[in-house]
């Protein structure tokens, strides 16, 4: 299957905006993560925030491999 260069461009744009999401999530992750020790309900939120922090890695991987849009 041929790789679509248009997908690389779309993933690059997504990568650009994913840094904004990652910085936002990183701030709140740092605030909430210590509370997961004593409040179990916080772990679900911190797991979601961690996925937001890892979003630039996900977008960069898709961009480099020119995977589907």
Image (cartoon, rainbow, N blue to C red):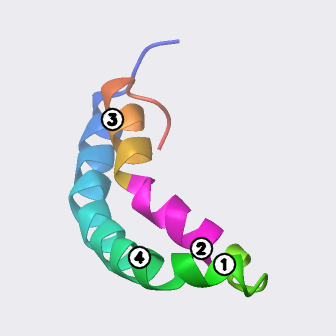
Q: Would you call the spot at circle 3 few (<14 residues within 10 Å), some (14-19), or many (20 or more)? A: many
Camera-side mark, 1 or 2: 1
Identify the residue shown where x is 24% and y is 46%.
Answer: 12
Q: Which residue is mark 4?
A: 30
- Percent x, y of residue 47: 63, 67
Cβ–Cβ below 8 Å for labels 1 and 2?
A: yes
Left or right, 40 with reference to 23 = right
Identify the residue shown where x is 54% and y is 78%.
Answer: 34
Q: Which residue is mark 1?
A: 36
| Nearest the eye: 2 or 28 | 28
| Image quadrant assignment for residue 28 | bottom left
Q: Which residue is mark 3?
A: 63
Q: Would you call the spot at circle 4 few (<14 residues within 10 Å), some (14-19), or many (20 or more)? A: few
Camera-side mark, 3 or 4: 4
Give the vertical position of 41 relative to 3 (above or below): below
Camera-side mark, 3 or 2: 2
Q: Main secondary structure of the magenta part?
A: helix
Q: Which residue is mark 2?
A: 46
Q: Secondary structure at mark 4?
A: helix
Q: Would you call the spot at circle 2 few (<14 residues within 10 Å), some (14-19), or many (20 or more)? A: many
Which badge, 3 or 2, is on the more N-terminal residue?
2
Which badge, 1 or 3, is on the more N-terminal residue?
1
Which badge, 4 or 2, is on the more N-terminal residue?
4
| Image quadrant assignment for residue 42 | bottom right
Give the vertical position of 52 relative to 68 (above or below): below
The answer to whether residue 65 is magenta is: no
Q: Secondary structure at mark 1?
A: helix
Left or right, 51 with reference to 36 = left
Identify the residue shown where x is 44% and y is 44%.
Answer: 58
Query: Which residues are drawn in magenta?
Result: 46-55
């Amino acid at each position: 299957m041929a790789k679509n260069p248009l997908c690389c461009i779309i993933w690059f744009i997504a990568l650009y905006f994913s840094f904004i999401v990652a910085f936002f999530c990183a701030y709140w992750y740092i605030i909430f993560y210590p509370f997961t020790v004593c409040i179990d309900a916080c772990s679900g939120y911190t797991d979601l925030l961690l996925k937001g922090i890892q979003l630039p890695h996900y977008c960069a991987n898709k961009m480099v491999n020119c995977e589907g849009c």
